[in-house]
Amino acid sequence: MSPPPYITYPIFAGLPLVALTTTRSALPQARGGSLSEKDILQLCRVVGLPPGQLTTAKQVHGTSIALVSSPGRQVIPATDALLTATPGQALAVFTADCVPGFLYDPLTPAIAIFHAGWRGTLAEIAKKTVRAMAKEFGTNVEKLVAVLGPAISGENYPVSDKVGEAFVAGFGEGYPGITKDEGVYKLDLREINSAQLADCGVARASIYINQQCTFADGDWYYSYRQEGASAGRMISVIWLGERKGYGY
């Protein structure tokens, strides 16, 4: 059976926002790391979003964070996290093994989304995005609701000694998501990002981790580690408000 065109997250059910991640079936012809505007238009059709409300970023595996306050279709250069308090303004990141992270502040209300590969995770982009929300919106971190979407599992993500040792040096031995098995370091990026969110005050009960592995669930998701440079991308989107039916 083919996967649905996108998945949603139960922890957000009933809340006044939309958050989702597409699967392969939303854009089965996608190849390579760059989605054209035509591809993005097709994804907007699939998820029920006017493309004029979508902000994306030129992701660089860094920790730059952009506040989105003006409406309209935008592509923010050299950025890996986006935040807004503007209703209807959609924020999106593209992934193919990296972690898509969603944050919802129900009191402001405000939202954020971040892209965390190993470089962004090592540089604590999750923590920095939470702190940016606190600075911009006065977000009460203890009230945040967080989701970490489909990504490569620790079992399928061995890394070099250099990378593994950098994580141990940065977070300490025994930190969640960092393991060494038979001399090989492995990273569970979702567990590490979850621990970082908890470290900065997000309640663990308010952090939802999707357990699907992009490497193992190849019928559902694109995987750079599995497919190399030809891998397509999933798009993860969040916006304040309801989904509507749009036809183009």
Image: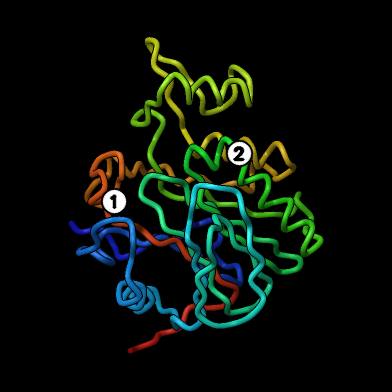
Q: Whole-Å distance between the Cαs marked 1 and 2?
A: 24 Å
Q: Secondary structure at mark 2?
A: loop
With 238 as the anchor, is 128 left or right in this view?
right
Residue 175 higher or lower than 55, as above or below = above
Where is residue 71, by image quadrant? Answer: bottom right
Give the quadrant of the C terminus: bottom left
Where is residue 225, by image quadrant? Answer: top left
Identity of the residue drawn at 72% across and 58% down: 133
Would you name the residue on which mark 2 appears?
Answer: 123
With 168 as the anchor, is 29 left or right in this view?
left
Residue nearest the viewer, comparing 137 with 166: 166
Give, as a three-letter code, the residue at label 1. Tyr
Would you name the residue on which mark 1 appears?
Answer: 222
Residue 204 higher or lower than 17, as above or below = above
Identity of the residue drawn at 48% across and 65% down: 237
Residue 47 higher or lower than 111, as above or below = below
